[in-house]
Amino acid sequence: MQTITYIVYLIASILFIFGIKRLSSPKTARQGNMLSSLGMLLAVVVTLFDQRVLTFEYIIIGLIIGAAIGALMAVKVPMTGMPQMVGLLNGFGGGASMLVAFAEYYHILNTTGPVIQAATSVTIVLSVLIGAVTFTGSLIAFGKLQGLVTGKVVKYPGQHPLNALLLVAVLVAGVMVILDPSKTDMLIGIGIVSLILGVLLVLPIGGADMPVAISLLNSYSGLAASMTGFVLQNNMLIIAGALVGASGIILTIIMCKGMNRSLMNVVLGGWETAGAGGAAAAGGADAHKGDVKSVDAEEAAMIFDAAQSVIIVPGYGMAVAQAQHAVRDLMNVLESKGINVRFAIHPVAGRMPGHMNVLLAEAQVPYDKLYAMEDINDDFPNTDVVFVVGANDVVNPAARNDPSSPIYGMPILNVDYAKTVIVNKRSLNVGYAGISNELFYYPNTLMYFGDAKEAINKLVNELKEL
């Protein structure tokens, strides 16, 4: 039976690897998800037949309750709520790892007494530490995305020294548990302090840095699972956790490069001005940039109608307004007029990696129309009209032009190189970085004010009449 188990684990591991590979493209992402799910199903089924499983009653109860909750969430949670759901799932993974580590610790104490191998003690401590940090950190991330916790950067005196002190305390307590496994109170203390540490580490991260935070927490959940695999001596859990941890940290690095910032900068609170909100000044500091020109739905429709090529740049504002279906309708009416329409996706647009891709896919926008920044940036100078829907900092030319800007050096979409840029926003409010967007004042930029869903629907109706 053990040989069969190892063979099935090997097959499941291969399915995980190929599944992750297929997730690298929107066209194959669903297939990748199915392959990974199949791998996990095989791993779970063969594990249930392991001789160490003594009773199935609680397992069946857990399966029924978990499946019911999962099915309900899959049906009820809208696509715009996916970032929050991903955050919760990361937290559940970390919390499960923490609980399993505690359960195995007490099981060993009750069966063999306070004699635990050093390697097992180390992995128990790490599983509790990483799992607890992931659990509460993910809950804070969920709260920020859901609007239950402020999306601004939260800073307070002594923040970093306090975090460092708590981490040192956890590590010292961990060493004491490794040296004397009977110190149950120390392990409980590690769990409690780690839960607090998770809150304190994620709370300073601003709402717009959530793509990085979610990727990092996903990596944490994988590492916690891998540590739990060592605790349980389960090869499949070790491999699956390591794959999630490695892919999560790679994605985190990609997100950081997309903002030209280091991981430590994001984790330690990011830009001082981040999340400040507020409107851009109508005069004063912005007066030298020129006047803002605006258009209504009828004028914008005539500009689109005369174009041959259009690039749509979605941002978080599209997600907030739930305007992805309206954007799809705009694409359809433009294509019916023979206009070439494509989408430019910035790697950190939205509140989780691939947020814009998920929303547009839900609206049935073909995958082959979604272009990554590096694949479409050179095409903007040859584009008649760029339509920016709710994006701000990721299209701000200050990232190229202003060395004093906090976003200087951040890769952006070169929308300002297009012949005409139409920006749909509710107002001239600043973006997450807390600075005015130079693009709004460019001579080739026109502002189309209003809620994205309502404004685009008006635009679509005007285009149909032309």
Image (spheres, rainbow, N blue to C red):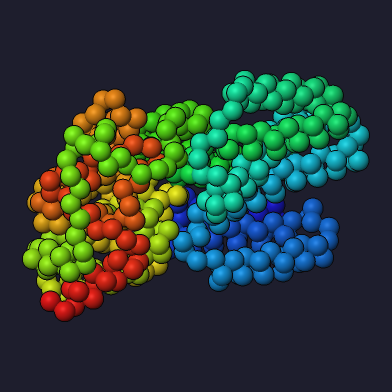
Question: Horizontal placement of 440 versus 390: left or right?
Answer: left
Q: Which residue does the image show at 17% across and 64% down from the upper left? A: 300
Q: How many marks?
A: 0
Q: Is residue 346 above or below residue 183?
A: below
Quarter of the picture holding the N terminus: bottom right
Q: Which residue does the image show at 36% across and 49% down from the upper left? A: 349
Res 124 seen here = no
Q: Is residue 430 above or below residue 129?
A: below
Percent coordinates x, y for residue 393 in the rendering? 32, 42
Based on the displayed image, in which of its 4 quarters is residue 51 positioned? bottom right
Q: Which residue does the image show at 70% across and 38% down from the upper left? A: 195
Question: Horizontal placement of 190 versus 397: left or right?
Answer: right
Res 381 seen here = yes
Q: Is residue 198 above or below residue 385?
A: above
Based on the displayed image, in which of its 4 quarters is residue 53 positioned? bottom right
Percent coordinates x, y for residue 217 in the rendering? 55, 42
Percent coordinates x, y for residue 438 in the rendering? 23, 40
Q: Residue furthest bottom?
A: 465
Quarter of the picture holding the C terminus: bottom left
Question: Horizontal placement of 1 versus 438: left or right?
Answer: right
Based on the displayed image, in which of its 4 quarters is residue 76 positioned? bottom right
Nearest the eye: 105 or 303: 303
Percent coordinates x, y for residue 124 in the rendering? 74, 35
Question: Horizontal placement of 157 versus 331: left or right?
Answer: right
Q: Residue furthest front?
A: 283
Nearest the eye: 284 or 263: 284
Q: Which residue does the image show at 66% across and 43% down from the upper left? A: 136
Nearest the eye: 340 or 1: 340
